[in-house]
Structures are given as structure tokens and as C-alpha cells.
Image (cartoon, rainbow, N blue to C red):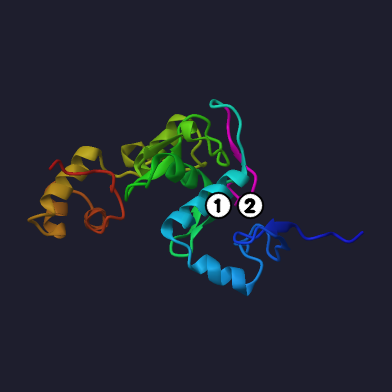
Amino acid sequence: MIKMKPKSECLICKNPFINKNPGRRPGLTCSIICEGKKRRFTDEQKEESFKRRFFEKIDKKSINECWLWKGFRNKKGYGSLMHTKENGQVQAHRASWMIHYGEIPNGLIIMHSVCDNPPCCNPNHLQLGTIALNQQDMVNKGRQKKGNAGIFGSNSYSAKITEDIALKIIESLKNEKAIRIAKELNVSKYIVYDIKRKKTWKHIKLES
């Protein structure tokens, strides 16, 4: 039995066409003519197209249930879709936040605060957060990987100093050399170098 390739609807003319690469950055138009028209889309038209393609791939249920992504998912279970040619691919749960709440501020991520379900795109299950907050949330919920992954600071079994000493090192690095700080605090110079290069203890911040 011959397996038929799935058909897609052209973004411009709405006619069905065979998608030669389903699930992996598929084409959105059926011909060169329609592709040319797509490139002349206004920003407003691009956002409307983004919303329409997003909701076509969502299994939308009640306000409290997970809205699962029906399209392509990566190995971790997260969906993705094309935003615009300029912005490229965006994860499905991030797309949901952008559509329902607006742009995501620089330096912040979108966390699954309710369900911890990667393919879920229900905006009521999402919240803004930081990488450090997300790591701590994993630890609190017992979702960190085996070993030392997801655990940082003095909670890590590989930690050689405490938060207080790390803070003293960070403060001293503004005016003193690493070797001198290491001698004064009786710690390895490599610990100080790693902090200086922001390889370790990056979650410790000086008060402004």
C-alpha cells in the first residue's frame, strides 16, 4: 500500500498541496507565485498567519486542562513552529505566551508552572521566569537529572566554598587580583579564576 504524503493548505491561495517535508520546517506556500505574495506580507498579516498556524496545531480544551501540541515535537516533547522568516522557529509554549500576553522580555524564559508537561501550550499553565528559577523549580519538584545536574551553589556535592565566601570573592574582584584574594581567603586560585570568568557561582549577584 502506497503511503500518501500529508497535504497542507497554502497560506496565500488556501489550495491544498503536498508538503514534501512535514514536521521539519515545512513550506507554507504551494508555488513560486504564492511565495512571492507571502514575502510582501505586512507585519500584521504575518502575526495573523502565526496565530492561525498555532491554533491549527493545538488540541484546545478547557481552561484548566493541558492544550497539547499536535505538530512536530523534539526529543524532550517540546513543539515548535515558524514565527516569521526574520525570527525563525519558536517553541510552541513560547508562541502561546507571545500570542496571549505579548513579547517575552530579554533574559526571561517561559516555565510550565502548573502541569510540567512539555507539549502543553495552555497560557494558564505558563509563567515568566529565569533559568535559575527554573532550575530551582526542577529541584523542588524532584525533576532534576541524576547526579549534580540542576543543583547549584552549596547544595552541589562538588562545591568547595559557601555562598558567603563566593560573595566575598565577587566583591573583592572589583579591586584586587585573583591570586591575592585566594591567599587572603585560603582557597584555591582556580576557584577565584572560575568565578571571575563566570564559570561558577553565576547565580550570586551583588546588591546594587
Region of the chain picked out in magenta, as a range:
65-76
Residue 124 percent across, percent down from the top left:
47, 31
Q: Are marks 2 and 1 in contact (CB under 8 Å)?
A: yes
Residue 101 percent across, percent down from the top left:
40, 39
Q: Which residue is mark 2?
A: 72
Query: Which one is earlier in the sequence, the residue at label 2 or at label 1?
Result: 2
- Residue type at mark 1 is Ser
- Residue type at mark 2 is Phe
Q: Residues within 10 Å of mark 2 (few under 14, many from 20)?
A: some
Q: Is residue 188 magenta?
A: no
Q: Secondary structure at mark 1?
A: strand
From the viewer's side, name the closer residue of 169 and 80: 80
Q: How many marks?
A: 2
- The reply, left or right, for residue 11 in relation to residue 126 is right
From the viewer's side, name the closer residue of 148 and 107: 107
* Quarter-of-image position of residue 12: bottom right
- Mark number displayed over residue 80: 1
